[in-house]
Image (cartoon, coloured by chain):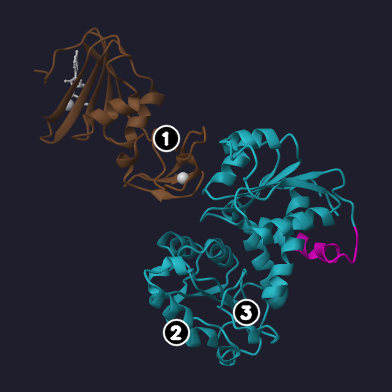
Chain colours: A cyan, B brown
Amino acid sequence: MGKPSFSDFVSIRDLTKKQMSEVLERAEGMIPYASGEKRTRALEGRILGTLFYEPSTRTRLSFESAMLRLGGAVMGFSTPMGTSIEKGENLSDTIRVTESYADILVIRHPLEGAARLAADMSSKPVVNAGDGAGQHPTQTILDLFTMLQAKETLEGLNVVILGDLKFGRTVHSLSEALALFGANLTFVAPPSLEMPREVIADIESKGVKPHYSSSLGDAVREADILYVTRIQKERFADAAEYAKVAGTYRIDSRLLSQGKSTLSVMHPLPRISEISPDVDSTPHSLYFRQAANGIPVRMAILSMLLGVDP
Amino acid sequence: MKELKVQPIRNGTVIDHIEPGAALSVLKILGVNGENVKGTVSVAMHVRSKKDEWKDIVKIEDRELYSNEVNRIALISPHATINIIRDYNVAEKKSVKLPEVVRGIVRCANPNCVTNSNEPVETSFLVVRERPLTLKCHFCDRVQSNVEKYII
Ligand SMILES: Nc1ncnc2c1ncn2[C@@H]1O[C@H](COP(=O)(O)OP(=O)(O)OP(=O)(O)O)[C@@H](O)[C@H]1O
Ligand SMILES: [Mg+2]
Ligand SMILES: [Zn+2]
C-alpha cells in the first residue's frame, strides 16, 4: 500500500464512499491480528500519542490495544489533570510539542472542532476520537463494519435508530454514512430529541428519505438492525418525564420477538438500562461483537494513516 | 448635479450603496478607526439613493482600498460599490465579491466551538449559500446565517 488518500481522520464527511470501503476492507484483514491469532510488528518503532482531554476508557484502551497489536508503542494522557494543560497550556501549543514525540496522534476533546484544529496544526496524522458533540468517525466506521459483517451488505438494509438523536454524537455521522451506502433509515426519538434538520437535509441530499416512527413496535417489525443509543437523564426537565421515555424505549426479548428472527441489536455502549440483559444471550445481540470490532477498525485506520501494511 | 451629502474628497475611497444601518459595521470590518487613518472619514447613514431606496455611504480620504479588504464588505452589504476617487473624480468603480472562504471577521455561532476558546486560531468559514448568506465553520461544521450578529 502506498500513501493513503487521506492524511488525517477527523470527520466522516471528509471521506468518500470509496475511501470508507477501503477502510472497511482493511479492517476485515486485521481481524486475525486483532484477536491475537496472528502476530505483526508492522508498526514497530512507531509511537502513538493519545491526548485525552476527556476521559473515555473504552475508546482510549481500544486505540492503545490497536497500536500495541500492530507492534507499535503508546504514550499520552488520559485526563488533562496533572499535565501542563492544567496550568493553562492551549491545545495548539500541546500539539506543536507532542507531535515531535509521536508519529501519529489520537485526540479526544470536549470542544467541537478541536480535532480539526489539531490536524491543521500537526504535520503528523491526527485521528479524532470524539470532539464535544461533534464527530467520532472511528465509531462510525466500526458501526458500519459490524453491520457489514453481520448482514453482508449495507444497501437496502433496514436500519432503525433509536434514542437521543439530537445530541447523540454517534448517530449523526452514522446516519449520513448509512445514507451514502443506500441503507433505509427509520428514526425513533422522543419529541424533544429528534434528529437535527441539518442531518436530515444531508441524508436527503444523498437520495435517502428517512422514515419516522413513534412506535418502537412498528419500527422493529421490518428492521434488520436496531441501533440503540443512550438517553441521558440531563436532557429532561424532570425525572418523571425521563422515566416515562426510558420506559417506552426499553429493549427486551419480548419486543424483539415481534421482529425478524435475524434482527440484530447494536449499541455504542456503555448501556444503562436501554437493553435488558435478557437480550444478551439471544442471537439478536450484536453489541459485544460491535465493541470488539473497535480493535480491527482502529488498527486499519492507524496503519493506513502511517502507510504500513500488516 | 452630483449628490454630495458630505464634502467632496480629492483622493480616497467612497463606499456607496451600503445596506442602511450597516455603515459602522463596514468600518469595523475594514478595521478603520479614528486612529489609523490619515484623512477624514465621513459616514452618511440613511441617505436616499437615486433609485429612491435607503442606503449608507462611507468616505475615506487619502486611502485606496484593496480588493481583498473590500470583499469582506460583501458579508454585510452585497450591493456595495467601491469608488476610488482621484482628483475629485471617480477613477475606478468596483462591486464587492464574496470570497469562497471567509477568514477572520466572523465568530462561530457555536459557543462550544474550539475557535471560541483561548486557542490562537483565526476563524474560517466556507460560504455555503450567498442569499441568505450562510457560512459553515471549517472547525466544527456549524452552519450559520445571521452573520452581522457575529462580526468580530
Ligand atoms: N469627489 C468626491 N468626493 C466625495 N464623494 C464622491 C466624489 N465623487 C463621487 N462621490 C460619490 O461616490 C459615489 C459614486 O459616484 P458616481 O458619480 O459614480 O455616482 P453614480 O453615477 O450615482 O454611481 P452608482 O451608479 O454607483 O450609484 C456617489 O455616492 C458620489 O456621491
Ligand atoms: Mg448613485
Ligand atoms: Zn465553529
User: Start and end of the magenta stretch?
Assistant: A25-39
The amino acid type found where label 2 is placed reads: Ser
Labels 2, 1: front one: 2
- Disc 3 and disc 1: Cα gap in Å? 47 Å
Question: Which residue: 66% across, 62% down?
Answer: A141
Q: Residues within 10 Å of mark 1 (few under 14, many from 20)?
A: some
Mark 2 within 8 Å of ligand 3, using the beta carbon: no
Question: Looking at numbered disc 1 in the image, what kind of residue is underneath it?
Answer: Pro
The image quarter in which residue A266 lies: bottom right
Horizontal arrangement in the rendering, residue A196 relative to residue B18 (left or right)? right
Where residue B24 appears, as percent x and y from the top left, is 24, 28
Q: Is residue A148 visible?
A: no
Quarter occupied by residue B152: top left
**Residue A215 shows which numbered tag?**
2
Say whether mark 1 and mark 2 are on the same chain.
no
Q: Which mark is residue B29?
A: none
The residue wearing badge 1 is B99
Mark 3 against mark 1, which lies toward the viewer? 3
On screen, residue A50 above or below B45: below
Q: For the residues tagged 3 and 2, is the chain the same?
A: yes
Amino acid type at circle 3 is Val
Q: The disc numbered 1 marks a residue on which chain?
A: B
Q: Residues within 10 Å of mark 3 (few under 14, many from 20)?
A: many
Q: Is A33 included in the stretch rendered in magenta?
A: yes
Q: How many marks?
A: 3
Instruction: Indicate the secondary structure of the residue bearing disc 1.
Output: loop
